[in-house]
Image (cartoon, rainbow, N blue to C red):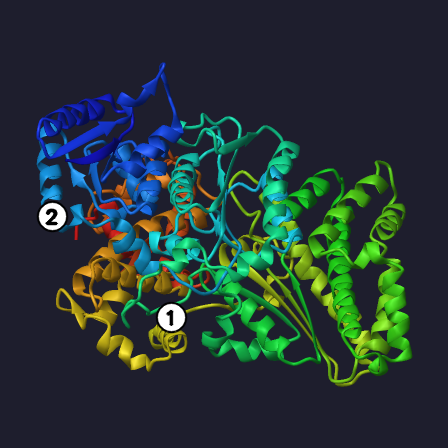
Amino acid sequence: MKKGFFAYSSYPSSCGQAIEIAISEINKSEDYYIKSWTSMSVNGRLISLEILKEIEDADFFCADITGINDNVLFEMGYALAKNKPMFIVFDTSMIESYRRYNELNLLTDLGYNDYQNSSSIIEGFYKFASSRYFDEGLYDTIIKRFAKSTERKALLYLKSKYLTDSTKIVSNTIRDKRIPVTIDDAQEVKVQPLSWYIEEISSVQAILCEFMATSRSGFEIQNSKSAFIAGIGHGLNLDILMICEEPYNTPIDYREILQKYSNPQKCENIISPFVNKISDNIIEILTTKNILAKKSKIRTEFQNIRFGDFIAENEIEDLYEYFIETLFYSQLLNNNVNIVVGRKGAGKSATLYYLKDKYSRDKKNIICVIKPLNFEIDGLVSLIEQINGEYEKNFLVEAIWKFLVISEIAKKVFENISNKPKPAVTRQQEEFRSYINSNKELYFDDISTRLENCIDKIKEKIGNGLSQNEYKAKITEALHLDTVYSLKQYFANVIDKDETIIVLIDNLDKSWKKDNKISIIGRIIFGLINSVERIVGDIFIIKQKHKNLKFNLTLFLRSDIYSNIIQHAPEPDKINPIWLRWNDYEVFFRIIEERFSVINNKDSSDLWHKYLADEVNGEKIKDFIISRVLPRPRDIIYFFKTALSTAIVRGHEKVTPDDFIKAYKEYSTWVFSSLIVENGITFKQMEDFMYGFAGSKQIITFDEILNFLSEAKIDSKDLNYVERFIDHLVSLSILGRETNIDNFEFEFEFDLDRKNKVLNSRLQNRRFKIHPVLYPYLDIVE
């Protein structure tokens, strides 16, 4: 007789009743005996270790994912790691459960049996019991196929999308201990594909799961994801830390594992021992494969194919090798000042890392990367709110940027000199090193710490009733701006001829989100743009002594942020941004071709001729992809990785048309979530509005948009507001405007829509088309 364990949620109660009836009927046979959690209470309490032991001892595992319960997901992850054959059921008629299942987008590779009654469960179970899957654990069919045995890291960190003071402590603790970490940042992507998590889990020895308090919006998806991944890690005997801000009602299964905190200090007390342990054993961790990597399956040639990561931060070391240079890169290298503008996922961070790597290959270059974390920007916002007067605010912002950039250059010059052999160091360079050593508090800390210190010192110095001259003097004193003059004199003497100073600035969009002080953040960013010319002027003082000295400052901005702040610029025509666009589809496909060729050491033509179906439903494969994928590097990489992992899970040696169709459905879910994230600060009811599209036609009229707005409780009477809302939908590529009868144009940047808007307004019946990327997720009628 084979034993099984059935995990399910107590809600909805009708599901539990159907499951218990099914268990009772199945247990009447002499072949199977299934136990559920309801039979395991001890004096009215459930013992988590007993439940996990029951799963481990079982021959197979059953689970109902209706309700998307964190307890059940933890048990599923644990059973997956313990290589248990899995029978999964799901009552898809439960609307909210089905919506959360699609949004979670993590369990699709596991499959499920749809049911609404006990008979369906019984019938599905016997089909499962008679199939080959009854003797195969998903560890072999899923985990081993995606586990990798190289590229060791120490920690996988599932990071909350809210950067609270406690999250700041977690991030700083990991950073300060220099722990090699892969970060699953929910602010960037809510949920990664299951194959991604398996790959990353196989390369680490520890997992840190940051759950969210149930009082915070969006906690369900973050906590469900964290519970499932923690279950896998726990089943693999990895070091697991599960933390959560209160309030959170901890599920039974990990009540003894998850640690809750009520303030940042308690969070630090929890996180520090965990990170210190990793740091103390870092050499052993990085040189020893974990249990998953040791058992990684021998792969076929097809299963070994890789496309890299769609998050640039996760492939910094390899990105240079397969980065695609387009025409605008020559501009970046030749201009003194660049403002690079692009949508989320368009390749801004990838460009920064590429430039950093490219410049780093020449030892004459001085490279400064400034990427403030959003909690430092939040601190600056708080400071500006306390200051009265436009002049004072502008002076403060520009002064802070000037100090940060110049001090960062000084730090890098110091590091370059310190790395020289002693005989190669000149007298002036030695004097400069002594000067920096005598002012360690200004230059030795990383830029995040320096920004925090600046803010603290300014708060101490400024007060009410100061004249402009007094105010400037206080700010100058607080930021040590008098030292900037000294630094410039030193620079002229210590920077070698033919050197280039490169400053790369990113991450300024991290605080650009709902309910934040948008106008002030815009001021901070515009203050940087204004201060750039002055910084360049300071650097050109050095060039008077070094004719061959070059200076390059590049600022990376999200296009919606740029569009917002440029409206308030006094002379917007003087700002000439470089736009990151991928409207040349041959170049766009080169992104994936170059990755395929370099990472897998194969000819790029093999990708299309050997490993991919030629067409899908009669449509050539490139046409199928380009009509359904938004033209951003992140999107095409995600789509290809999903198609590949789908084919591998199904045991294919080529991506088939059905694999592409399934990948399209998963990609559609992912895009919906990413568009909500990209939507960011505008139109709070955007998500409700977009769900209004569900089941609608591809083409909708202006009047239908008004109805959708009303249903989402968005003001549809203010036509100016409605037009701005439609502009926003178009800018996100959610809608395309009809520019001629039955001809719809989608825009993928924020500066190209003016002509299409005029053409659309001239049509008698204004119509719009929903982008095909959303059809599967929203069940749009094709």
Say what secondary structure mark 2 lies in. loop
| Mark number, residue 583 | 1
Instruction: Describe the element under mark 1 as helix, strand or loop.
Output: loop
Outermost top residue: 43
Q: Quadrant of residue 498?
A: bottom right
Question: Which residue is pictured at 80% across the width and 40% down the height?
Answer: 459
Q: Amino acid at mark 2?
A: Ser
Q: Nearer the viewer, residue 157 or 297?
A: 297
Q: Amino acid at mark 1?
A: Asn
Q: Residue drawn at (31%, 62%), measured in percent from left and top?
A: 297
Quarter of the figure with the N terminus: top left
Q: Which residue is mark 2?
A: 131
From the viewer's perspective, is the residue at label 2 or at label 1 nearer? 2
The quarter of the picture where residue 53 lies is: top left
Q: Residue furthest front?
A: 1
Is residue 562 shown above or below 227? Answer: below
Using the image, tell me which numbered label, if any, was put on residue 673. none
